[in-house]
């Protein structure tokens, strides 16, 4: 069977990195540093490349990623991918938030590759985000691509903007969730999902 393929684009666009580099040089000066100091000479370029990597999701198409690996299948039980490592950046402070995503869906004739679920999470996470929107975007993308009987997404994350700036308790984690279909209408299905993701070690 032939499925449309999705080609991943690496963005280390030289012109963008070059421009970012100059801005980071200016930032170093503004915070009181000397960009010419030995340890910092290559820092603006490194940060420029790091920032390009951390925002590479803008150049990816999560729907296309899912559609590149869709298969007809009559399986109608819950498919759960849990503990997907997640690294994102809050759009308010441009500081990292990180944690785990748990994603489940109940197929209705179509399934996707399990690794593609993780790639969808990655694609939306590698942008400036708020955790709430990230959760909903992942849910909606899977719902749109697969039209399953339901989708469930839970994200648990720690926000460096809270931890480093000491506004809230240092160890606090934020949990967000988003559901569609049977996960909304049938509380037993939702509870089964919640139980499955709360068992850290089977
Ligand atoms: Zn923040």
Image (cartoon, rainbow, N blue to C red):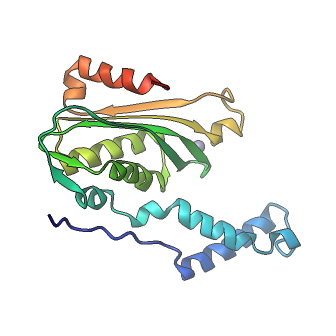
Does residue 174 lie above or below 113 as drawn? above
Residue drawn at 34 percent across, 45 percent down? 138
Does residue 123 lie above or below 24 as drawn? above
Q: Nearer the viewer, residue 45 or 29?
A: 45
Does residue 36 lie above or below 132 as drawn? below
Split into 4 quadrants, where in the image is the N terminus? bottom left
Looking at the image, residue 156 sits to the left or right of residue 2; the answer is right
Looking at the image, residue 104 sits to the left or right of residue 35; the answer is left
> How many tags in the picture?
0
Residue drawn at 52 percent across, 78 percent down? 13
Q: Position of residue 58 (x, y in %)?
A: 42, 63
Residue drawn at 16 percent across, 47 percent down? 110
Looking at the image, residue 25 sits to the left or right of residue 141; the answer is right
Q: Nearer the viewer, residue 160 or 113?
A: 113
Q: Residue furthest bottom?
A: 15
Q: Nearer the viewer, residue 190 or 164?
A: 190
Q: Which quadrant would residue 197 be assigned to in this image?
A: top left
Q: Position of residue 200 (x, y in %)?
A: 49, 26
Q: Which quadrant would residue 2 be assigned to in this image?
A: bottom left
Looking at the image, residue 88 sits to the left or right of residue 62; the answer is right
Quarter containing ligand 1? Answer: top right
Q: Position of residue 57 (x, y in %)?
A: 44, 60
């Amino acid at each position: 069977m032939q499925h449309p393929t999705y080609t991943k684009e690496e963005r280390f666009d030289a012109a963008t990195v070059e421009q970012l580099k100059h801005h980071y040089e200016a930032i170093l000066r503004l915070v009181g540093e000397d960009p010419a100091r030995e340890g910092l000479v290559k820092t603006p370029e490194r940060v420029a490349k790091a920032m390009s990597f951390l925002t590479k999701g803008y150049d990816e198409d999560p729907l296309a990623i899912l559609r590149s690996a869709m298969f007809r299948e009559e399986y109608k039980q819950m498919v759960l991918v849990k503990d997907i490592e997640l690294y994102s950046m809050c759009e308010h402070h441009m500081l990292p938030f990180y944690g785990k995503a748990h994603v489940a869906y109940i197929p209705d004739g179509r399934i996707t590759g399990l690794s593609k679920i993780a790639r969808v999470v990655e694609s939306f996470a590698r942008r400036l985000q708020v955790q709430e929107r990230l959760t909903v975007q992942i849910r909606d993308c899977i719902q749109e691509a697969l039209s399953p009987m339901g989708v469930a997404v839970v994200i648990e994350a720690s926000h460096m903007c809270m931890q480093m700036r000491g506004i809230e308790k240092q160890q606090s984690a934020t949990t967000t969730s988003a559901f569609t279909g049977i996960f909304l209408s049938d509380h037993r299905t939702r509870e089964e999902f919640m139980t499955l993701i709360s068992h850290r070690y089977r």
